[in-house]
Amino acid sequence: MNKQTIDHLAKKVQKTEETLTNSERNEISAILKAHKESLRHNDLVHELSQIGRKEIPRNEWKAFFRNCIQKIGEGIQADCIRYYNFTFKAETGEPGLIPEVVWQAQSSRDLFDPGNSPTFLSQRKYSSLFERMRNRSSFQTTPDKEDIGPLKMLMQADKCLSMLVLPVRSNTTLYGMLRVDSCHKDRKWSDSELNLLHPIIFQLRNILEKRDLEKQLHSTYRQAQIGTWEMDIKSGNFSWSKVTKEIFELDSKSLPNGELAADLFYDERSKNKVMEAVERAQITGEPYDLEIKIKTAKGNAKWVRDTGQAQFKNGKCVRLYGIVQDIHKRKLAEQESEKNKRLLEAITQQTEVAVWVRNDSGDILFVNKQWKSIFGLEEKEVIGASLRDFFEKKHADEMIASDRSVVKNNKQVIFEELIKTASGPRHFMVNKFLLKGISGFENAVGGIGTDITEIKKTEERLQKAEEKLREIIEHSTNLFYTHDVNHKLTYLSPQSIDFLGYHPDEAKRRWIEFVSDHPDNEKGFHRTQRAIETGEPQPPFELELVRGDGVKIWVEVNEAPVIKDGKIVSIAGSLTDVTKRKEAQSKIRDSLREKETLLAEIHHRVKNNLAVVASLMQLQAMESESQDVRGELLESVLRIKSMAGIHEHLYKTEDFSNLDFAHNLKTLVGEIVDTMQYSVDISLKFECDEVRLSVNQAIPCSLVVNEVITNIIKHGFKGRKTGSVVIRLYQNDKTVTLAIKDNGVGLPADFNPESTKTLGMQLIKTLSDQLFGTFKFESDEEGSIFTLSFQKKADKSLHT
């Protein structure tokens, strides 16, 4: 029934209304009402269809979709419409429906607050709702018809008298749900009314599909860094998408224009290249696709892909549009790949090893210059040819079979091969491998051949040298061995039978099992461990070993760490039997010990004899009535005691050539002060370093000290009750210095050591000459100081 027929019927009803029965009148009214409803639905479907064809900016999509739901609500005269979007909960991934748009008729806004409804209808909780949507395209219900459950509680909470559910879905995808609520009365939708709603849902689904498609496209463009642009030729206006502005590093609110676009070119070459393509597109309609370098608004250089094409109207170009894509990373990768390609080519062509690629049919796909040189094929083109073109059939078939085994087993092989080259037979180390993941080379085999002929010759020479070394080791009187860092023997020469009492294979155990409990062995243990820890060779040392038969022998150990790749892997060494030498040394030590004991006894007797002489002279001095004689005798007593003190020190020490002179000096000066017994209270101070002298230097030095101290006590403190003496002894390198300082009256003004003829001064001169030293006297108002310096020498130096 078309519109003209309906209008004619409506006019006829108005003219003949008095002649119609009530039944006829109701029938005609129902027909007219249904038709008007159909027209309203058709208008709504058409409007939604028109809306769906429009380009909707992404930031305006939400308002646009809300407008669509409002039009549907007004068109079907609903109290409330909710559109639920099907989604997954972010926290748990649970599927369900979330309300995206809620529209209410003006008459229903005071009945309830849609904000009180649940914000997420989970598929698990509202399983009956999802089940009915899956089984039917639509359904309607009321709270009275529903069993107690979430859906009934939902309608009661929303004061819904009836609810119509319209799933928005394709054959495979559920986009969401359109919920139509009646709040003033229980509205029952007839089949004809539901049929009228299906086109509306269809158009709504198309709109949602378009939205999802645009989202996916926008996401794809963003991920691929692709932006759009267009230019109106007449107005000169530019339009750039958000991604385009991001590529050019522009603010999203900036307005593009021709001047801004011109400033983005990296240089004039890039600018001219694009301008020529744009001009050609406007004239011929030919699209362009260029890769150019730009300079962003922030001054950064970047590679982009720029495509464009022209739109014509009435034979005239009215619009240019296209895309711009950020290809900077890809371009850099391509440049790096090209650089690596040239680098690889340079390496393969300049290396001394042969490099080739062949397929499993024997066709040559690549060779470098060295490969061609090896076989004398420098002047021939070999790429694309077969191995059979250059080698004898048997030889070529062997190479092809070897290549095929690599392909079949999918495994790298490394082997040595004797090859007939242009310069004669040569040994090569060959490495063959499958080329994986390279398109077009699925059955290709790569190879690297390294000429090892000289290495083989060196190995032969080493083998001969090793054989000679083995002969030396096996016939040596020494035992050669290696042990790991855990002290386990890993190699022993045949001499292990003589040294350890075991065959080499039987003796491969921890070497410390062959060591006795002699205390000197600890030094050897320490040196071996130090070599393991530091990697440094240690001085030779001696060990006492216990043979398998219980016999003990002494050996001298010479060993050094073996280091590989910066890591200590073992200790290598040799043992020399020094048992007889040790026995001889023991006898010599015993003999020396006897002689040293005898010598100490001699020094003891000399000391005692000197002490007796000193005592006799001291008694004689006490009995003498002459003061001068008494003084001379006491001075002689002190000289004798000085020598006796040295001999006493000698028999108490174990080393006669290494006396602690500082200790002797303190004893000597103390005895001098005690023996002189003058009335002056003298304080002594010693500032002495440890200086060790031989007996031949200690005795004259002691006598010099005796003369100087005696002279200070006799003359230095005349007219005084107290005095102090400071004795300093120190050694700088090999020079020994002795300084004696007093705070006495000082030396006479006319004192001259060279002209003084006293016995004491003559002794100081003589003894200083014996020490090959020098001395001097100094004096001032603070007292006097005597200094003696001489070179420390061994005994043999003093006897020359």
Image: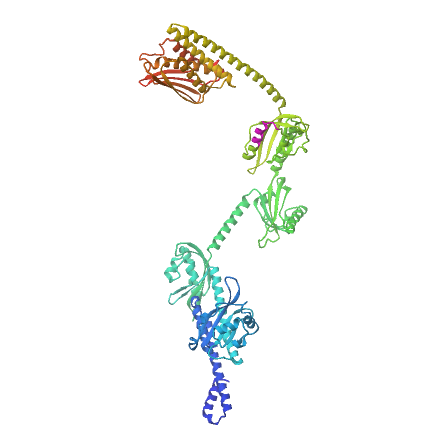
State the image quarter where residue 542 is shown: top right
Q: Identify which residue is drawn at 40% across, 61% down.
A: 252
Q: In the depicted view, which residue is nearer to us: 155 or 763?
A: 155
- 483 relative position to 668: left or right: right
- 247 relative position to 191: left or right: left
Res 136 visible: yes
Q: In the depicted view, which residue is nearer to us: 50 or 144?
A: 144
In percent of width and height, residue 394 lies at: 68, 46
Residue furthest toward the top?
625
Q: Main secondary structure of the magenta part?
A: helix
Q: Does the magenta stretch include residue 522?
A: yes
- 396 relative position to 33: left or right: right
In percent of width and height, residue 675 lies at: 41, 13
Res 771 visible: no
Q: Which residues are drawn in magenta?
A: 517-528
Q: Identify which residue is drawn at 46% across, 87% down.
A: 7
Compared with residue 648, is residue 142 higher up or lower down, i.e. above or below?
below
State the image quarter where residue 577 is shown: top right
What colouring does the structure picture have? rainbow
In percent of width and height, residue 220 lies at: 49, 62
In percent of width and height, residue 569 lies at: 59, 36
Compared with residue 416, is residue 61 higher up or lower down, i.e. above or below?
below
Q: Does the magenta stretch include residue 793?
A: no
- How many numbered discs, if any? 0
- 604 relative position to 110: left or right: right
Residue furthest toward the bottom?
19
